[in-house]
Image (cartoon, grey):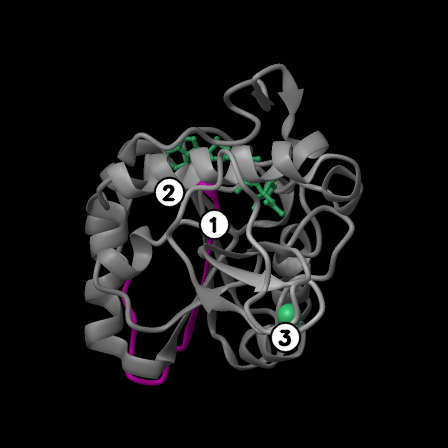
Amino acid sequence: MLLSKSDRVFALTGAGISAESGLATFRGSGGLWEGHSVEQVATPKAWDTDPALVWRFYSMRRRDAEAAEPNAAHFSLGKLEQKMGDRLFLCTQNVDDLHERGGSRNVHHMHGSLFESRCVKCNEPFPDRREYLETLPVCDTCGSPVRPHIVWFGEVPLAMDMIYEQLDQATVLLVVGTSGSVYPAAGFVHSARQRGIQTIYVGPEEPLNAASFHRIEIGTAAAVLPSLF
Ligand code: OAD
Ligand code: ZN
């Protein structure tokens, strides 16, 4: 795909881009963790009923992400940013930090970040790489519980206004490794089509919203992305 100086790329990535780094996708692994569905541990209700279980889940995910390395797909988006600067907007549904470690400076984590936490009252996210397997963290300032800085099912993704502004300026929508099943991200391709911009999907199988894309590249992210642009 040839890009000109006037092109602006909106890239949306999902769990699939980190699959070749060894991080399980949500639906691929049967969506199960220790017998709980991911939906069961990633909701405000789960937090209200069993915060220790929720922290155990995210502590394990911190551990897995720390041990993982970025793959060729992360690196190629890092390189694309070097060439395009702010004409590339990278929006990820992933909470891992593999894009950053793959060289991307500017990443919007619409579903939050694994390596940040926030007090449920003060609401200010702060960097946090610790694992909470025994004692649960409380806020230094007010003593309230500290939760993962993750957007759970039923919560609103971060900075949706900014996302739609970027989508409005893009000339290409590139979607990588997401099943197209979780909204609002699954609907970005519909907004893009309404504006008539190019839309392309990269992944080993068709996403649920495949019919809305101009072009589908069947293949893994690490195999396809490095030679796509
Ligand atoms: P899913 O697990 O739903 O989908 C993963 C997608 O990655 C599938 O479409 C696979 O075909 C694709 N895939 C697998 N291996 C790949 C590879 N090597 N290269 C490229 N693609 C590959 O994950 P998401 O769509 O990211 O939300 O899930 C969306 C949201 O639902 C997540 O952000 C998370 C989840 O529950 C929250 O945590 C709020
Ligand atoms: Zn507080």
Identify residue for label 3: 164
- Quadrant of res 21: top left
Along the horizontal axis of the image, is 6 left or right of 43? left
* Mark in the foreground, 1 or 2: 1
Q: For the magenta stretch, what is the residue range?
A: 1-15
Seen at 60% across and 81% down, the residue is: 165
Which mark identifies residue 12? none
What amino acid does circle 2 point to?
A: Ile
Q: Quadrant of ligand 2?
A: bottom right
Residue 13 among magenta residues: yes
Which mark identifies residue 17? 2
In percent of width and height, residue 160 lies at 66, 71
Residue contact between numbered discs 3 and 2, judged by CB atoms under 8 Å: no
Along the horizontal axis of the image, is 83 left or right of 63? left
Seen at 59% across and 74% down, the residue is: 141
SS for callout 2: helix
* Mark in the foreground, 1 or 3: 1
Along the horizontal axis of the image, is 213 left or right of 86? right
Identify residue for label 1: 94
Residue contact between numbered discs 1 and 2, judged by CB atoms under 8 Å: yes
Is residue 162 in view from this perspective?
yes
SS for callout 1: loop
Q: Would you say the beta carbon of the disc 2 residue lies within 8 angstroms of ligand 1?
A: yes
Seen at 52% across and 52% down, the residue is: 93
